[in-house]
Image (cartoon, rainbow, N blue to C red):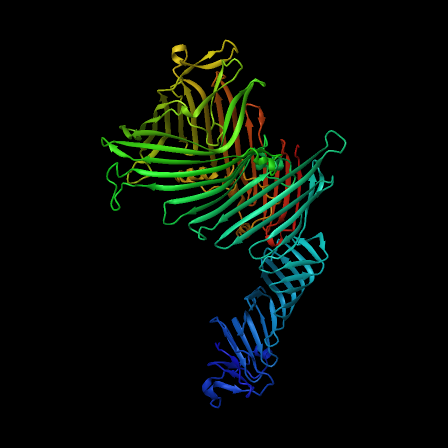
Amino acid sequence: MCLSGLSTKAQDKTTDTDIITQAKDSIVQNDNIAAIKNDSITIIQNDSIPNIANDSIALPKKKEAIEYIIEHSSQSTEGYILEDVPNKKVEIYNEAHVVYGDNDITAGLILIDYNTNIVQAKGIPDEKGKYSQLPVFKTTGNETTQDSLIFNYKTKKAIIYGLETEQNGINTLGQKTKRVNDSTIFVRNIIFTTSDPRHPDYYLKTTKAKVVPGKKIITGPTNLVIADVPTPAIFPFAYFPLTKNRTSGIIFPTYGESFNQGFFLQNGGYYLALNDYFDLKLTADIYSNSSWGFNASSSYRVKYKFSGNFSFNYDNLISGIEGFSSYSVAKNFNLRWSHSQDSKASPNSRFSASVNLGSSQYFRQSVNETNNGLGLTNTLSSSVSYYQDFVGTPFNMSISANHRQNTNTKDVYLTLPSLQLNMDRQYPFAPKNGAKKNAFQKIGLTYSLKADNQVTTTEDEFFSSKMFDKAKNGAQHNVSLSTNMKLLKYFSLSPSMSYREVWYLDKIHKEYDPVANKVVTDTISGFNAFRDYSASTSISTTIYGMFKFKNSNLKAIRHTMRPSVSYSYRPDFGFYYEEVQENADATSFQTYSRFENGIYGGPSRGVSNSLGFSLANTLEGKVANKDDLEGEDKKITILNSLNLSTSYNFTADSFKLSPLNVTAGTTILKKMNLNFGTSLDPYALKQNSTTGKLQRVDALSYLNGGPLLRMTRANFTTGYSFSNKDFEKKKEGVNTEEEEEPTAYDQDLFGADQQNTNDFSVTPEDEENTQKQKEETTDLPQYISSMPWNIRFSFSTNYTNSLGEKKISSASLMFSGDVELSPGWKVGASSGYDFINGGITYTNLRFTRDLRSWSMNFNWVPIGNYSSYYFFIGVKSSVLSDLKWDKRNVNRDF
């Protein structure tokens, strides 16, 4: 065995000779390469050839010099290099490596023939005939694997057998490949797949193809083969773009059937890759009953600056037959825009947008929009905002535009724009250096300015000139002074004062119209303002109580109370109010404020002299920890919160005592949350002699035969989730208090609605999650015993008794869960029950099958106004995302 390096180097054009340098300890046989395989090998030591100067042999001149050095070696200690110097041939065995310029070849066996400029490479077979160390060819940034190759290192042409390549996620395996040059390759009997090309789940097979590396693949007639079984899917040709950059192209539509619109073709159109930062997708929908739709969407991204996406959808949906009463036409649109700024782009300013506006019935009637979750909501909202921090000053500013739309009433509320200017808290009496030591030095001053232009309109008047007829605007200034101090060591005292000034550009004036015999309201333009102020103070402390137990696993209970008493005073600003008569004989008058229609309201009338009280409680325990070898006790939470609050207004004409509000919350069984809230009214109810209905009166309930406090409302919610992991941890004795990672369906009690998009195409992150599963074999009984599953429950109820109704206004139970029946099979369901209306709520069934390179999904809403189903099977890879079949049937009640 001999390790040697042989190099052929181009000489100066004047000499035009090839030099073959023989390395030390080389083995030379005066025969051709084929004869080398016989055992007639002559070993020639360097010192037995004294006439070879510098271990090199001068060869006859050639017409052309070789351009680069050919470097070769064997990387294995069990390999060898055989050099036939007279015939200029070399054989390299076991981890052979040859480099010529930017061409790099590694293989089990490499043969070099300097006469023909040919390099041959192939793998090494074992005793069972299985080849290893298959040739790997690297050139100009591309890397390929093949069974064997014949390569001319001067012309760069090659014949390759069993060529395996990967470009942009597409794996290919060709039987015979002819490489003309770096930019043109012809292949016969080639397959295309996104799975392992040696053992593919599926592939596209063609007899001939032309490959332009890094650009495209064009084939002849192509057949889809699944599990080595040819399918009827035969395509006259196929085109695979291989460019790393986005390219424009046709988007093929999907087909299906709608309950009201009949058969359809959806989302067919064209994709425009406008540049590296911006794209545009234009698609359309057509239906067999002449309905149609148009969709435009775009995404943009500038690295380290900003990113976002935009979409506009318009539907013209026809239902029924023209001339019949059931005939209707629904014209709906929806506009969505999302924009976010990279925090590194500008640390002192940011711009963001989240827009979702359009027709109220779009998500309920659109056949193409199958996000049932959005169809169940009754509100659309949008926000576009800009924030600026003025460096070197205490000021910051934000400008925003907001939109809120009630899809039931079709009312639209806009704020165009809203300006907010804030000043950070300033301490005018604090020392420039050192801590603030007393209450005077702790006095802080804050200022804020808020200016808004609000529009209330309807969906029909949206985007019309009429929508601004009812616009209201104004500006509000707020200034506050506050400080805090310790009182008697254990109490914290926090006094404060506030001043408000409000500006409006109009006011109202009311007067009695004797002709119409009613009060008429006029709006008068012009600058108007009012001012008010108030003062308040609060005192609070924290009290701890400890209860210890002997000879018990429960060592102690700690009760923490945080009582707070507050007082506020606001004078009477009744001088901003006026009176107007309501009838002809002036026996009835109405009091009003000229600012009462303003967006910030008007000044208060009457003195407010209020005392408030609140109490916050928590209960914690300490128990023996049997798992701790050092005997350290474990802390537990018994009661997360128990809060009470009320107030008393000394100057109110009636109902001076406010209801007692109580909220409580705790966690049991480590994962079940319990939350409760109620309002307790101290005042009684009395029957109205005229209407016969009960009404609240200014008399204490317990003095009128009622309870001390009367419950007027209450609510209770609870939720619990558990999974197979909880039981596994119990068996293994693992602490289950740690938070578990959320599952795919944890984002929503009803499960992840997999109809959020128009199909189930898998994102690039999902393309990497199946390789390990392919290689693993699963013990079925063991899998069943540890089958992954999870279930979530939620219950909520509301009680109303403000006027003696004693009515449970709502009570519903909701659940969601999923189970992996086997590796790759997941089944999920979500539903609920409305106890008040006596019916099943929104129900969704989900079935998902991971087919390694493929995915199959079935989403079914069996009942209700949004009953529908959607089936999808397709290739996971985004490169072949059009290789799919989906079918949906959507029922939308107009």
Q: Residue at the top extreme?
A: 689
Left or right of residue 644: residue 308: right
Q: Residue 61 location, x and y as percent?
A: 58, 87
Q: Nearer the viewer, residue 404 or 480?
A: 480
Q: Nearer the viewer, residue 866 or 233?
A: 866
Q: Residue 11 location, x and y as percent?
A: 53, 84
Residue in the picture at 31% in, 27% down = 563
Q: How many marks?
A: 0
Q: Is residue 518 above or below residue 360?
A: above
Q: Is residue 641 above or below residue 741?
A: above
Is residue 266 something that shows in the picture?
Answer: no
Q: Residue 221 location, x and y as percent?
A: 72, 59
Quarter of the rendering containing residue 469 = top right
Left or right of residue 597: residue 115: right
In the rendered image, the quadrant that contains the C terminus is top right
Q: Residue 577 location, x and y as percent?
A: 44, 24
Is residue 615 something that shows in the picture?
Answer: yes
